Image (cartoon, grey):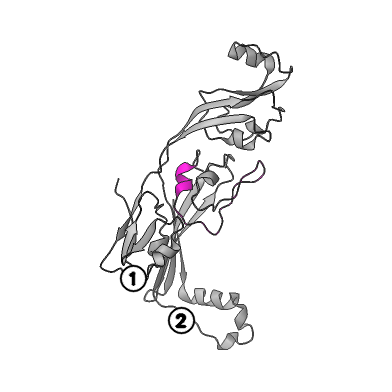
Amino acid sequence: MEIKLKKKIKNLQKEVILKSADFKKDIEDFSLTADDFEDNNKFISISPLCIRCNLCVEECPVEAITDSTSTKIPKINDNCVKCEICLQTCPISCIYLMEATSIINEENDDVEYFLKDKKVPHRILRMEKIDINREECTSCGSCTKFCPTNAITLKDKSIIEAADNKSYPDLEDKEYPYIRENLCIGCGSCAHLCPEGVIDLTRILGPIIETKFLEIDHDACVGCSLCEENCPVEAIKIKNGNVILDTELCISCNLCSRKCPLKALTLKNKDF
């Protein structure tokens, strides 16, 4: 999906003036010029379709996502570095990345805005093992609310015994969670939402897929250490005036390259 918006520069100038509280008294004498300019940014948002598995929270390397609850989806905070790991990890792809570009073209007397959603590859996610301690279960049903495949449902004790071909004499005659393991994707929504913590999940989560790489221009670098100071995971160091990158730690967030005053660092997309 791509969205394009356009407006005249004079309309932008009027909006800036009207929205500025500093010019209330002298707005008639104020003038604003707009030169050629281009800005690129990224925005990440979480859809209300979120299943509250909290995987994005667990995998965020900078702790920029708040916990979800049964009534609240996770929230992405201002310290997000746009590394895109949450997008690769979300089991149902309900986290979206929008690339935004703003261009002021003085010659054409217009301002253009472009919004484009970026597709991100998905990590492998599988359920390896899942167990329920029904003796401690209160049968509240919280575990079933957001299961994306309806793999977990509340079933009568007799149905569970028949399905498992096993007797559970210590359980009361009531409904308990039952998991059809062939449908479970290992997202962990049930385990995260269970208030009693009676669901134990072991999952297989594949490695992060490298979609970008950091190109370093050692000739341009002056060893100012801004990249080292701003790296959120301490993946980049300056040693003897040279940039040393730990590719195992690097999360390809682009923070170092945006802070570099000499453009000695460039984050580039990999060709697939």
Range of the magenta residues? 66-90
Q: Does the magenta-highlighted stretch encompass residue 84?
A: yes
Dominant secondary structure (helix, strand or loop) of the stretch shown in magenta: loop
Q: In the image, what residue type sits under mark 2?
A: Thr
The residue under the point 40% across, 55% down is 235
264 versus 120 height, above or below: below
Report which residue position mark 2 lands on. Answer: 33
Of residues 14 and 169, the one drawn nearer to the viewer in this rendering: 169
Q: Secondary structure at mark 2?
A: loop
Report which residue position mark 1 lands on. Answer: 262
31 versus 100 height, above or below: below
Q: Where is residue 52, by image quadrant?
A: top right
Percent of width and height locating residue 230: 44, 63
Q: Which mark is residue 66?
A: none
The residue under the point 39% across, 54% down is 252
221 versus 207 height, above or below: below
Q: Is residue 120 left or right of residue 161?
A: left
